Image (tube, grey):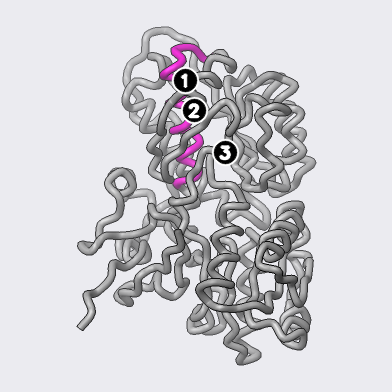
C-alpha cells in the first residue's frame, strides 16, 4: 500500500464556525497606549463591492487584521498605523480617482492596491508621479517596471509565473496539445490570453480556440461548445470573477464533457463550488495554488499561516470561502511594507525602497519575497503549485499536484 500523501488546505475549512458575525475592519483593535506621535497612514484601494467582491473582501480582511496585529504590538517605528480605505467597486475610473485623492490629498505614506490588474494599470503613473511607495496587488507583468515605476513593488506573484506553471502542467503532465483559452474582457483577461499564447509557442503550439467574454454574460455555453467543436482537449480560463468562472465550469458539466480545466486561482474558491449545479463538476478542474495552502502529514499548515488563522479564528469564518491566497495577499501588502519601513527607520519612500531591495527574504505568510534594485516582483516560482479543485473537500485526502 502506498503511503498516504498530505492533503491540502481545504481541511482547514472544518474550522469554519457557524453564526460568526462579520469581522470588524477597523485598524484600531486593542491598541496599546501611544506617545503623541504622527500615525503611519496606509492608503488602501480594494473592490469590496462589484464583480470581484468575494476576493476583495477577504483581501480587505487580511489587510486590516495585519494592521491590527501590528498596532497591538506598538505599531511601526513606535507610531500607530491608520488605514485610509476606498472601495473602487471594480471600476478602473474610480480606482484612478481614489488614487489621486489618496496620494495628493490624504497625506498617505504608502498606497496599497488596487488589488486587480485592470484597476492597477491606470494608477501606476499617478502614484509614481506623486513619489509615493506603491504596493501593487495585481499580477500582470506590465505593472512592475523598476525603471519606469521605481517605487512600485508587487505583493503577490506575477501572472506569468501562474501561466508558465499552468502551461507546463497542461502540456507536460496532462499531455494535452489542443488548448482552448477562455478569458474575460478585462485588461487582465486579455493580457493573460496573450501570455498563454506566448508560453504555448515555446512548445510549438497554438491555441485551437480563444474567446474573450464579458464576465457578466449570463451563459457561456456557446463559447464552451465552440471550444469543443475546435477539438480542444483542455481549457484554460483566466478570470477573477467567480460568477463567470462558475458558469464556465457548469457549462462544461452540463455538456457531459469532462475535458480538464486549468486556470486562475479563483477556480479553487469555495464560492465557485457553491455556484455549481453539481459539485462533481469541480472534478478534473485544476487551479494555480500555493505552498502555503499545503498541509503536512499531520494536517498542519505552515507555522506562520496557522498562527495567523488561529489568532483570528473568531472572525476568519466568513472569509475562508475565498481561500487562503485571498486574505494572505492582503496581509502580505502590510507585512512587506512593515519590513521595509522597519529597516529604513523612516517612512521616506526612497529609504523604504532601498530597504526593501536589500532585505534577503521577507517571510510573509503568503510566501517568501525577495526584491532587488532590478527586480520588484519578489515572489518565487517555487511557491506555486497546481491544486485539484475537488481535492479541497474535507476527508478526501488527495495530494495537490505539484509542479516545480
State the residue at coordinates (47%, 34%): 370
* Principal secondary structure, stretch drawn in magenta: helix
Q: Which mark is residue 341?
A: 1
Q: Which mark is residue 147?
A: none
Q: Which mark is residue 377?
A: 3
Disc 2 to disc 3: CB gap under 8 Å: no
In front here: 111 or 175? 175
Q: Secondary structure at mark 3?
A: loop
338 to 88, vertically: above or below: above
* Residue 141, percent from left and from top: 67, 45
Q: Is residue 339 magenta?
A: yes
* Residue 357, percent from left and from top: 51, 25
Mark 2: few/some/many CA within 10 Å (<14, 14-19, 20+) = many
Mark 1: few/some/many CA within 10 Å (<14, 14-19, 20+) = many
Disc 3 to disc 1: CB gap under 8 Å: no
In front here: 352 or 331? 352
Spatial CA distance of label 1 from label 2 is 6 Å
Residue farthest toward the bottom in the current orientation of the protein: 256
Corner quadrant of residue 92 = top right
Decide if residue 88 is on the left or right side of residue 65: right
Region in magenta:
328-347
**Residue that badge 2 annotates:** 337
195 to 127, vertically: above or below: below
Is residue 338 something that shows in the picture?
A: yes
Q: Nearer the viewer, mark 3 or mark 1?
A: 3
Amino acid at each position: 500500500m502506498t503511503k498516504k500523501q498530505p492533503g491540502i488546505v481545504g481541511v482547514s475549512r472544518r474550522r469554519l464556525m457557524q453564526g460568526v458575525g462579520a469581522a470588524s475592519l477597523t485598524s484600531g483593535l486593542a491598541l496599546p497606549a501611544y506617545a503623541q506621535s504622527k500615525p503611519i497612514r496606509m492608503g488602501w484601494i480594494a473592490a469590496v463591492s462589484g464583480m470581484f467582491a468575494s476576493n476583495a473582501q477577504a483581501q480587505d480582511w487580511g489587510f486590516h487584521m495585519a494592521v491590527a496585529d501590528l498596532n497591538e504590538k506598538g505599531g511601526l517605528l513606535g507610531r500607530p498605523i491608520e488605514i485610509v480605505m476606498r472601495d473602487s467597486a471594480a471600476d478602473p475610473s474610480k480606482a484612478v480617482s481614489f488614487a489621486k485623492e489618496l496620494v495628493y490629498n490624504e497625506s498617505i505614506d504608502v498606497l496599497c492596491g488596487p488589488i486587480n490588474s485592470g484597476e492597477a494599470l491606470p494608477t501606476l503613473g499617478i502614484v509614481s508621479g506623486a513619489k509615493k511607495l506603491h504596493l501593487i496587488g495585481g499580477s500582470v507583468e506590465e505593472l512592475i517596471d523598476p525603471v519606469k515605476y521605481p517605487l512600485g513593488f508587487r505583493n503577490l506573484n506575477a501572472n506569468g509565473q501562474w501561466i508558465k506553471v499552468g502551461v507546463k502542467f497542461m502540456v507536460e503532465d496532462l499531455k494535452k496539445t489542443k488548448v482552448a483559452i477562455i478569458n474575460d474582457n478585462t485588461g487582465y483577461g486579455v493580457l493573460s490570453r496573450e501570455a498563454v499564447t506566448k508560453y504555448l509557442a515555446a512548445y510549438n503550439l497554438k491555441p485551437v480556440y480563444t474567446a474573450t467574454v464579458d464576465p457578466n454574460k449570463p451563459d457561456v455555453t456557446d463559447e464552451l461548445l465552440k471550444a469543443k467543436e475546435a477539438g480542444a482537449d483542455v481549457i484554460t480560463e483566466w478570470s477573477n470573477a467567480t460568477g463567470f468562472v462558475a458558469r464556465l465550469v457548469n457549462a462544461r458539466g452540463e455538456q457531459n464533457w469532462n475535458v480538464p480545466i486549468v486556470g486562475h486561482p479563483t477556480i479553487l474558491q469555495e464560492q465557485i463550488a457553491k455556484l455549481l449545479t453539481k459539485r462533481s463538476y469541480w472534478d478534473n478542474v485544476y487551479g494555480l495554488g500555493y505552498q502555503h495552502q499545503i498541509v503536512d502529514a499531520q494536517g498542519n499548515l505552515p507555522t506562520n499561516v496557522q498562527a495567523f488563522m488561529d489568532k483570528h479564528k473568531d472572525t476568519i469564518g466568513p472569509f475562508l470561502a475565498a481561500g487562503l491566497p485571498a486574505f494572505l495577499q492582503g496581509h502580505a501588502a502590510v507585512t512587506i511594507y512593515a519590513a521595509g519601513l522597519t529597516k529604513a527607520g523612516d517612512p521616506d519612500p526612497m529609504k523604504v525602497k532601498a530597504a526593501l531591495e536589500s532585505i534577503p527574504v521577507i517571510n510573509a505568510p503568503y510566501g517568501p519575497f525577495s526584491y532587488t534594485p532590478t527586480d520588484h516582483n519578489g515572489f518565487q516560482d517555487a511557491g506555486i503549485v497546481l491544486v485539484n479543485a475537488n481535492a479541497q473537500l474535507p476527508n478526501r485526502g488527495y495530494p495537490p499536484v505539484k509542479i516545480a
